[in-house]
Amino acid sequence: MIAVLANNQKYNCKKLAEEILLLLRARNLDSVLIKNHPYSKEDKNVLRGSSLLITLGGDGTILSAIDEYARPENKMQKVIMSVNMGTLSYMATIPEKVALPLLENFFDTQEELFRFYNFHDDGKGYSREPFLKAGRKKSKFRLQVDKRSLLRIQTAGGKQYNALNEICLLRQTPTKPLAFKIRIGGESIMRFSGDGVLVSTATGSTAYNLSAGGPILSPNIDAYVLTPISPHSLTVKPIVLPREDKLELTCLGDSQFIIDGILKNKIKAEEPLKVELAEHSVFFIEPYEVNPYKILKQKLLWGK
């Protein structure tokens, strides 16, 4: 199943979605067009049952679907191709004008792609050369694969969520700071008063984390970052954590948590949230020319 997610608020998005659906049907591929968030029950089932997600929009369009699309119980590789119909996009890297030929090249070379990952995705890194060779043979529109880590979040009641960018635990009352407790690997590490606490993947380190004073992580690094939000102490600083370290976040007052910009739930005082890097990942199919550091240089105006 292929899910095509179109943000129809973006200019020309509907027209491109129709062209993509025609391309997929010409190849006898099972595909469904779904609208942007909030999703119906049927749309959620489509996202969960799909192995390829084609998004038309910006980074927000991708993030709105991740929790449903990347659920680990689906036990299938989750691949994303994202066409940039917005402006400030770090993850939506396929230009609108080459979206169709890039899709054609992907379907012409996907056998090599999936064969490679089935045998080489051991969590220790990978080479993209098999895809590039396949791309050279089939088309001038070469491809590369970018593996991105996810966060797994679990509430005290056992409900689980996925995040591609971040989870944010915030106070419910905007005028009153609260106390937060942090445990790492079962050990109590930090207690502070402030507005909240943020946990970001390497992918999400350039989003809210960066605005909150956290560090930028290379997008393929197997680590994540904990960033206090407006702590009432000069000694409370962000910390980068390896995969094996697991977090427990607790707020001593009523709080709420937001995943990838979407409010998920409210939490009673002293109910813990468990956060760690998920065992599964998502794979972005991108133009070969995409370079994460070049994107950062362009977006953040480094050196200017």
Image: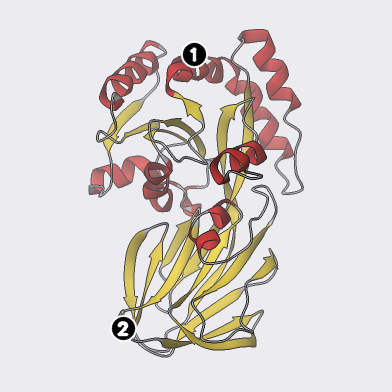
Quarter of the image with the C terminus is: top right
When the figure is inspected, residue 75 is found, relative to residue 161, above or below; the finding is: above
Q: Amino acid at mark 1?
A: Pro
Q: Position of residue 196 (x, y in %)?
A: 45, 77
Q: Is residue 69 left or right of residue 304?
A: left
When the figure is inspected, residue 10 is found, relative to residue 248, above or below; the finding is: above
Pick the front one: 88 or 140:
88
The residue lying at 72 percent from left, 30 percent from top is: 128
Colouring mode (rainbow / by chain / secondary structure / one colour): secondary structure
The quadrant where residue 215 appears: bottom right
Pick the front one: 215 or 280:
215
When the figure is inspected, residue 156 is found, relative to residue 121, above or below; the finding is: below
Question: Separation of disc 2 and disc 1 at Cα?
Answer: 52 Å
Q: Position of residue 23 (x, y in %)?
A: 38, 14
Q: How packed is label 1: few (under 14 Cα within 10 Å), some, or many (20 or more)?
A: few
Residue labelled with disc 1: 101
The residue lying at 47 percent from left, 40 percent from top is: 89
Quarter of the image with the N terminus is: top left
On residue 175, which mark appears? Answer: 2
- As helix, strand or loop, the secondary structure at mark 1 comes to helix
Which label sits in the foreground, 2 or 1? 2
The residue lying at 61 percent from left, 86 percent from top is: 190
The residue lying at 68 percent from left, 23 percent from top is: 131
Residue found farthest to the left: 40
Q: Is residue 167 left or right of residue 200?
A: left
Question: Which tag, 2 or 1, sits closer to the chain's start?
Answer: 1
When the figure is inspected, residue 97 is found, relative to residue 207, above or below; the finding is: above
Q: How many marks?
A: 2
